[in-house]
Amino acid sequence: MQRQIFTEEHDAFREAVRTFLAKEVLPHYEQWEKDGIVSREAWRAAGRQGLLGLAVPEEYGGGGNTDFRFSVVLAEEFTRAGAPGLALGLHNDIIGPYLTGLGTEEQKRRWLPGFCSGETITAIAMTEPGAGSDLQGIRTTAEDKGDHWLLNGSKTFISNGILADLVVVVAKTTPEGGAKGLSLIVVERGTEGFERGRNLDKIGQKSQDTAELFFNDVRVPKENLLGEPDGAFIHLMTNLAQERMGIAVAGIAAAEHLLEITTEYVKEREAFGRPLSKLQHIRFEIAEMATECAVTRAFLDRCIVEHSEGTLDAVHASMAKWWATELQKRVADRCLQLHGGYGYMTEYRVAKAFTDGRIQTIYGGTTEIMKEIIGRSLLA
């Protein structure tokens, strides 16, 4: 079916993204995978191309366009290219709204120009060794010392953790903590007591630096509080729908692309003297995946439009996230199987997609958490 949600402006932007990928990303990607990190120059190139800060007001160096469909185009093209390491979606769609929506005028002028140029790479530090989806279990503390915050604790699995120049840290600012006692504290590169641990060795997304962060008596200026004191839980809940939509968009784009390349593969690959596509079982597998992708695409495009209009609720974002990412996982597994032994070779796109995509059902809220959100809304 022809998709109806994009305009000529979105199509032109898609071509620009493809050009950027071909010139600035794909020629270097294999080396980034070996290095376990992308180059900072790639971030600056993205800034020059206008791919950073799409929704940031123009006065701070951004694109000034809050239409989420441009972020969708970016996520789809990076997914199809197999290049998740340059985490523009994390920067633009997850961290960007915190800075633009909660930042003071002084904070915006201090941080957003670099955010948009690629000079300032960002991360958000929520997850801890003992607290993942349950934010109320956070132990990192920020103690009010009058003219500064004293930050202590550790975080793990932090995307952009090595490269980040600006880290939004979720910390406990009242002794009891819990949902009402968390704040967002922004820590800048070079702050004394802020240390980075190892670049974690993951099974996929090798070029996307993911790190442990440590805060040992870090003195953070009072003016680096983002949003309201003790208001982090509400702030985080407000922006989670967009984060989950971004993950869902990548999920369905990955499933569709895997289906495309596998369809071509079974047409060319022969077994028992004829193409695999002539076998009924293969045709049924392709038919099932194609139907699941088509149905999921219809729902996702509806969610994309509603989110762009500001009407998508957290429940439907959760539905989109769990369904699209679980579909991605199933399609990756089935497509790898249809490739046979070649599917297990890293030189084949399906092998890399299998490992790169496995995290999708975990970060941004696990499938189980998504189901809990949906179930509570229906059975409250």
Image (cartoon, rainbow, N blue to C red):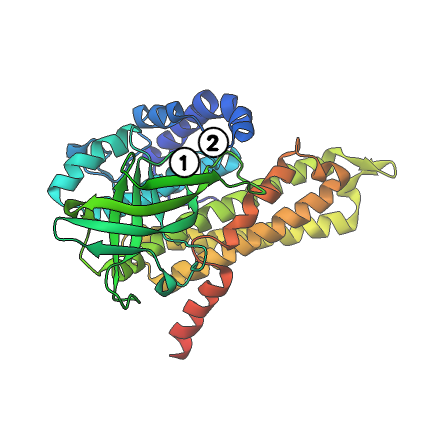
Give the residue at mark 2.
37
The number of discs equals: 2
Q: Is residue 106 above or below residue 308?
A: above
Locate the C terminus and report the quarter of the image it occupies: bottom left
SS under mark 2: loop
Q: Residue at x 12, y 40 (%)?
A: 106
Where residue 23 sits, quadrant-wise, is top left
Q: Amino acid at mark 2?
A: Ile
Regarding residue 130, the answer to whether it shows in the image is yes
Residue 118 in the image, given as x and y percentages of width and height: 31, 29
Q: Residue at x 31, y 27 (%)?
A: 47
Mark drawn on residue 162? 1
Residue 33 in the image, given as x and y percentages of width and height: 54, 30
Regarding residue 6, the answer to whether it shows in the image is no
Q: Amino acid at mark 1?
A: Ile
Q: Is residue 229 left or right of residue 134?
A: left
Q: Residue furthest bottom?
A: 380
